[in-house]
Image (cartoon, helix red, strand yellow):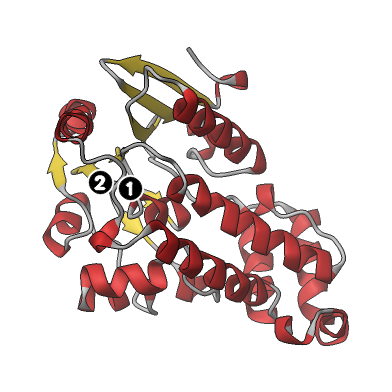
Amino acid sequence: MSVPNDLVLRQTTNGVTTLTMNNPRRLNGWTLEMLAELRRAFAEAARDPSTRAVVLTGAGDYYCAGVNLAGSIRLAHPAKLHAFIIESNRTLFEMFLNFPKPIVAAVNGPAIGASVTSATLCNAIITTERATFSTPFSALGVTPEGCSSVVFPRMLGPSAERMLGPEGWKPTGKQAVEIGLALRCVPPADLLDEAHRQARAAIDDGDGRRYPLGMSRQELLEINARESTVLATAFLRPEFLQAQFEFLWRKKKRPLALAFLALAKTQPAWRLLLAPEAR
């Protein structure tokens, strides 16, 4: 069974529902459409009495290329855009934080940005030798999200700065286990079986929904809300807008690239339209 448009496939076996992000042509990136279907799939799984745990994975070579900014940001009045980014980021991670049943992330290939940080909010990460974990916030000129400003330093120690900072280190699946980011690294052919074993163990042990490092859902919700506001402000700074222009220009998405360039060049003027705390 699948949700509309087959952007997220759903299959339930022995109480475990596998949700597969299914847009490999776009590396399973989180466009507005993908996020809407993913929210619908999570909501259905939460209500479904036959679903007692969820495994989240990706179709094709990638787990998920993260938030597709070109496909998720709609240019608007600066104040409205700032509010939109806050709401979008906050609700994205609340989708994981508010899900009431165990979640296991089965990271089948490269994971980028929000798909990495959201995975750390799950009960466990199972990965393969083909995976990498990239959180290029510093390179993009933005701030950490998905509670990573707090969770990563506590979970990963010195490795957190290597991933979140200027180095932009991308640990492999094996390295992710070594630093405490993932629970287990298995051959690709064994990934879903191992993820299902972990999900069944959570069901059988009665563990329920568990959060990283024994943190509470409320604590993580508050961190997410703070990060979302800081992130929205960073998104509207010239450094980020210029970086988006250069990225989109390389991708030959010229009209959208030029729109970001115009925003970057005129930012000193339109920033006055923002609330003081957002400037």
Left or right: residue 103 compared with residue 231? left
Mark 2 closeness class: few <14, some 14–19, many ≥20 residues within 10 Å:
many
User: Percent x, y for residue 19?
Assistant: 41, 28
**Distance Cα–Cα, label 2 vs label 1:** 7 Å
Point out which mark residue 125 bears: 2
2 and 1 marks in contact (CB < 8 Å): yes
Left or right: residue 141 compared with residue 248? left
- Residue drawn 55% across the image and 27% down it: 7
The answer to whether residue 225 is visible is yes
Q: Nearer the viewer, residue 61 or 88?
A: 88
The answer to whether residue 168 is visible is no
Mark 1 closeness class: few <14, some 14–19, many ≥20 residues within 10 Å:
many
Q: Nearer the viewer, residue 24 or 5?
A: 5
- Residue drawn 29% across the image and 52% down it: 132
Task: Classify the position of the C terminus by image quarter.
Answer: bottom right
Point out which mark residue 82 bears: none
Q: Nearer the viewer, residue 61 or 12?
A: 12
Number of numbered discs overlaid on the protein picture: 2
Numbered disc 2: secondary structure: strand
Left or right: residue 22 compared with residue 238? left
User: Percent x, y for residue 40?
Assistant: 58, 30
Residue type highlighted by circle 1: Cys
> Is residue 243 placed above or below 40 in the rendered structure?
below
Numbered disc 1: secondary structure: loop
Q: Residue furthest top?
A: 1
> Is residue 63 placed above or below 219 in the rendered structure?
above
User: Percent x, y for residue 60?
Assistant: 39, 30
- Residue drawn 55% across the image and 50% down it: 92
Where is mark 1, residue-wise?
A: 122
Residue type highlighted by circle 2: Ile
User: Percent x, y for residue 164?
Assistant: 37, 73
Left or right: residue 141 compared with residue 63? right
